[in-house]
Amino acid sequence: MAANLYPNGALRPYLAVLAGRFQLMLQYRAAALAGFATQCWFGVIRILVFAAFYAGGAAGQPLSLRDAVTYTWLGQAFLAFLPWNADPDVADMVRSGAVAYERLRPVDTYAWWYARALAWSTARVLPRAALMVAFASVLLPLVGLGKWSLPPPPTWSAAGLFAVSALGMILLSAALTVILNVIMTATMSDRGANTLAAPFVNLFSGMIIPLAFFPDALRPFLRAQPIAGLVDIPFTIYFGGLTGADAWRAIALQAVWVVVLVLAGRWWLERALGRLQIQGG
Amino acid sequence: MDALRLYGRYTAVSIRSQLAYPGSFLMMSFGQFLVTVIEFVGVWALFQRFGHIQGWRVGEVALFYGLASVIFSVADAVTRGFDIFGSVFVKTGNFDRLLLRPRTTALQLLGYELRLTRIGRLAQGLIVFSIGVHMTGFSWTPASAALLAWALAGGTALFSGLFICQATLAFWTVESLEAMNVLTYGGEAAAEYPLDVYARWFRDFLIFVVPIAAVTYFPLVAAMGRTDPLGTPAWALPLTPLAGFAFLALSLWIWGFGVRRYTSTGS
């Protein structure tokens, strides 16, 4: 379909790598199941802990317990979007020297890597998210645990805004993955990028706890930084914590960061590849 | 005695080989440290908002959190051979070689690697525990120190048992089963908070099915000199880490069963 829309095919190679990688990653069913089981368990622990905290009094909290539960399940469902690691295939290329071939392809290297990253994350997220939604929004209410389930967004407008913001989350995740690829290419090792990415992403995205729980003085900074667009902004929109103009402002911020990170990534990638010394013979 | 000497040799070789790349070792240890420290930043922020969880203050939770982290980092460091058993030994057929050697398979796998980078998580656990000691005025007496050492021993036995069960499953599944992360990493995560914050069914799981509470919560409550809000009699609290050793014994028995059933992938 998409290829036919562009008969002369400027986009074709990127769509091809997107589709190919997507299908490849979907093959890892056992990994998806194991990930799903682990994420259910961690979701349960987090929710039990939140319930215990809220039992001491919910007054004056930035989120209700219901919202915290929603946020937790969404976080577990979309966990694989978090850019913890550079693309492992690119890491292999950097190690083996095959990254030089990337320059021989008649395609734009940045767009090529971006399409790979996009396919990599979405193909890992989709099966897990589908299982998680089946578990948290269908199964839990059926067995009488509706209070602890993942509810649908409260209004149609929240649902629509969430869909837009989720798109921003996906684009942002891929832009960050490519930046990790570039750091790895520049430093010739995946250690540095992979070691430091996870802690920062976990903290600043709102994955560890919703950003609203951090001290109020930090909030303007936490909301404005780019990584909030990976978790906190879309999930807060989902349960109706950001509506109307506020939600659009948050989405615009996401979009600005996507553009900035893509441009920065492109510029840096060209620089890194220009200086690249190939390993091996 | 001979086994102990051999394990010492294995360990020395493993440490030397890891220190051959000091840059990589430092980076990965630091990464471990950072990931786990940042998790605790989240806990801290929640306490800033809520003040307490079921009456426990942040200092007390830091004790539970630190102890769980220390126990897990030690067990995770010594059982690396079991952790990667499926992909490195079963899938490749390399386990055949272990069976040919005149030593037990459990000893050889324990000696496979002492994972030094877990020092990052160990450091986090010790720091968080020290914060807890500082904030609660935890009193160091010979009895409380001995209780903590006893909990650490029982906890290491329990988590090692879990990694051995994970390895045993690989005799049937061939690959290392990631789903066991639910009990290993997930068990550690559950032990970070005092047991009584959880719902009844979850508490029962952590006491009777996989007795993680028996090696963290109960001995620590005794070491803090408190009475258990769940009503466990005071004399029983220090005995609970025995459950960790029982679990390890059971795991080794299951392991032996798996070894007898092993058929090589034959490559």
Image (tube, coloured by chain):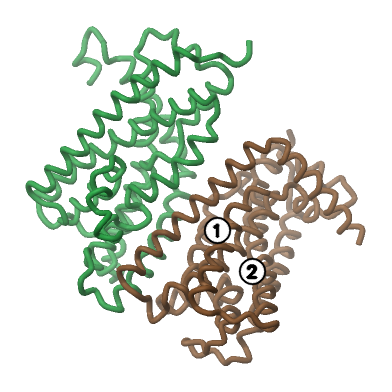
Chain colours: A green, B brown
Tell how many labels: 2
Q: Write the residue at 29% across / 70% down.
A: A145
> In x, y percent, where is residue A14?
32, 19
Per the image, label 1 sits on a secondary structure element best described as helix
Q: Quadrant of the C terminus of chain A?
A: top right
- Mark 2 or 1, nearer chain start: 1
Chain to which mark 2 belongs: B
Q: Residue B265 is drawn in which quadrant?
A: top right
Q: Quadrant of the N terminus of chain A?
A: top left
> In x, y percent, where is residue A267?
34, 19
Res. B161 visible in picture:
yes
Residue that mark 1 sits on: B124
In the displayed structure image, the side of residue B178 where residue A70 appears, left or right: left
Q: Write the residue at 35% across / 25% down.
A: A265
Q: Write the residue at 30% across / 68% down.
A: B49
Label 2: how many Cα within 10 Å (few below 14, some 14–19, many 20+): many
Chain to which mark 1 belongs: B
In the displayed structure image, the side of residue A38 where residue A225 appears, left or right: left
Residue that mark 2 sits on: B155
Q: Vertical placement of B105 versus A144: above or below?
A: above
In the displayed structure image, the side of residue A125 where residue A199 appears, left or right: right
Q: Residue B250 is drawn in which quadrant?
A: bottom right
Q: Write the residue at 29% across / 63% down.
A: A69
Q: Vertical placement of B87 versus A93: above or below?
A: below
How many angstroms separate mark 2 from mark 1 (CA)?
Answer: 17 Å
Q: Vertical placement of B19 versus A95: above or below?
A: below
Label 1: how many Cα within 10 Å (few below 14, some 14–19, many 20+): many
Q: State which mark lies toward you, 2 or 1.
A: 1
